[in-house]
Image (tube, rainbow, N blue to C red):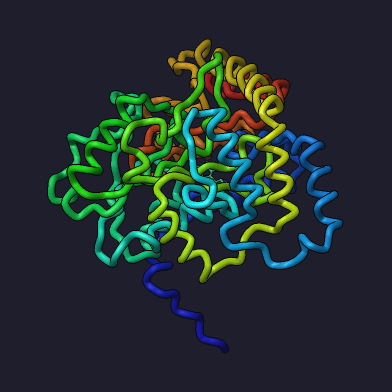
């Protein structure tokens, strides 16, 4: 018999996959023919707009696009990103130095600690948060330090509560607004405070802006780079995934500080060989002509948000309507943990939700619902929650 392979410490350190049990029960229920409603996934249900697919399909026919792409992305793509950025955020970026295309923003987020962190350096990570921040820090030998996002602070980082010794050892900080999973949004003042802290204590900021284009009630989420001094100490990650329903395509970008981007590009040049050029052409099309489409998407999510939040609030929840992202973050009923409540919803109502503790210890006591299902399914989900609640 073969001996099992002993995983290296960096893999052993990863937290257990908390959704494994839920995934297993979900598969079982579906196999039994149950009508499972999945409010768990953070992946748009709507298709990629057809004009973007056309652009891919045209570009895929051209042999010039079949070869290795440039590591730093096509100049045309970087120029399209700069044009979109200036139009959307009124921030000028140098397409040659201040923009780095990525194979999805997760790729860049996962690699950026390798570009900035020495073993033992502290990486400040929001909690609850996108799990990749923490694993990326570990993989680079960094020490993740969790920054609690609390309801009483509107899920903004409370910079003054961070230990001075930790700040002295911090090399970088991840931030993410509009936030997954809490859907909180940041103000200019908040980002200004973050920049002040970074300057005082000598760390870099990597802001994950995956959800700036999914916003409601005419609200326009900020770019971190709109705030004075941001470009001196940080970069921002953007993604075409959620904005244009392109999660499977794998295209995003980092922008901001040229030196940080150069270091990240150096890591990447040793690990990947760029984005398939046909996808880059499709990305150019999306950024230059897809803005209206993205706004229509937000309208669809907005109606779903109203339906879901009004429905939950009519049962006694008191959830404020999120201004951005396609997530609703809600407290679990008192007396149960996140995991218990999610299991109960799944087993007794065949509803999948994401237990908040899967995003970190400060997610305990909450659950996340995604607005990536049709209105009639949301109505059905609410009916089932109501029945369960009444029991
Ligand atoms: C979805 C998501 C990403 C990853 O997006 P890709 O560009 O598809 O890799 C990054 N950050 C957050 C917070 C997300 O929710």
**Residue 389 vertical placement versus 104 (above, below):** above
Where's residue 305, x and y in %?
Answer: 58, 20
Inspect this view and state whether residue 326 appears. Answer: no
Which image quadrant is residue 387 in? top right
Q: Nearer the viewer, residue 152 or 364?
A: 152
Q: Residue at x 74, y 48 (%)?
A: 31
Where's residue 190, x and y in %?
Answer: 31, 28
**Residue 267 vertical placement versus 328 (above, below):** below
Where's residue 59, x and y in %?
Answer: 81, 52
Q: Quarter of the image containing the N terminus?
A: bottom right
Compared across the picture, whether 178 is left or right of 51 comes to left
Compared across the picture, whether 180 is left or right of 378 comes to left
**Residue 340 vertical placement versus 170 (above, below):** above
Compared across the picture, whether 280 is left or right of 101 comes to right
Q: Which residue is drawn at 46% across and 65% down?
A: 266
Q: Nearer the viewer, residue 357 or 211?
A: 211
Compared across the picture, whether 227 is left or right of 93 comes to left
Q: Which residue is drawn at 31% across and 37% down?
A: 229
Where's residue 299, x and y in %?
Answer: 65, 19
Q: Nearer the viewer, residue 268 or 372?
A: 268
């Amino acid at each position: 018999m073969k001996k099992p392979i002993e995983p290296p410490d960096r893999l052993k350190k990863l937290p257990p996959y908390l959704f494994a049990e839920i995934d297993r029960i979900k598969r079982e229920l579906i196999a039994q023919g149950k009508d499972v409603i999945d409010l768990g996934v953070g992946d748009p249900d709507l298709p990629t707009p057809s004009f973007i697919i056309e652009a891919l399909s045209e570009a895929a026919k051209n042999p010039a696009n079949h070869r290795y792409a440039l590591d730093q992305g096509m100049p045309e793509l970087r120029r399209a990103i700069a044009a979109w950025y200036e139009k959307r955020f009124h921030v000028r970026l140098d397409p040659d130095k201040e923009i780095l295309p990525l194979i999805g923003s997760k790729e860049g987020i996962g690699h950026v600690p390798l570009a900035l962190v020495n073993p033992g350096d502290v990486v400040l990570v929001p909690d609850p948060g996108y799990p990749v921040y923490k694993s990326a820090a570990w993989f680079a030998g960094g020490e993740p330090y969790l920054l609690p996002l609390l309801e009483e602070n509107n899920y903004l980082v409370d910079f003054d509560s961070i230990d001075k010794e930790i700040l002295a050892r911090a090399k970088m900080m991840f931030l993410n607004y509009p936030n997954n999973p809490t859907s909180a949004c940041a103000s200019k003042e908040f980002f200004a405070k973050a920049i002040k802290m970074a300057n005082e204590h000598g760390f870099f900021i990597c802001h994950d802006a995956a959800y700036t284009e999914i916003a409601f009630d005419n609200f326009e989420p900020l770019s971190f780079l709109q705030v004075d001094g941001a470009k001196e100490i940080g970069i921002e990650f953007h993604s075409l995934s959620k904005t244009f329903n392109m999660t499977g395509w794998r295209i995003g970008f980092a922008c901001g500080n040229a030196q940080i981007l150069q270091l990240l590009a150096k890591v990447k040049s040793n690990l990947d060989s760029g984005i398939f050029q046909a996808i880059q052409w499709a990305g150019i099309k999306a950024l230059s002509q897809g803005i209206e489409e993205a706004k229509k998407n937000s309208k669809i999510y907005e109606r779903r948000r109203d339906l879901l939040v009004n429905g939950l609030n009519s049962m006694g929840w008191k959830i404020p309507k999120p201004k951005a992202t396609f997530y609703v973050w809600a407290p679990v009923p008192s007396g149960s943990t996140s995991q218990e409540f999610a299991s109960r919803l799944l087993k007794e109502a065949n509803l999948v939700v994401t237990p908040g503790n899967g995003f970190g210890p400060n997610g305990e006591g909450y659950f996340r619902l995604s607005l990536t299902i049709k209105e009639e399914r949301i109505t059905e989900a609410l009916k089932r929650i109501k029945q369960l609640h009444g029991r």
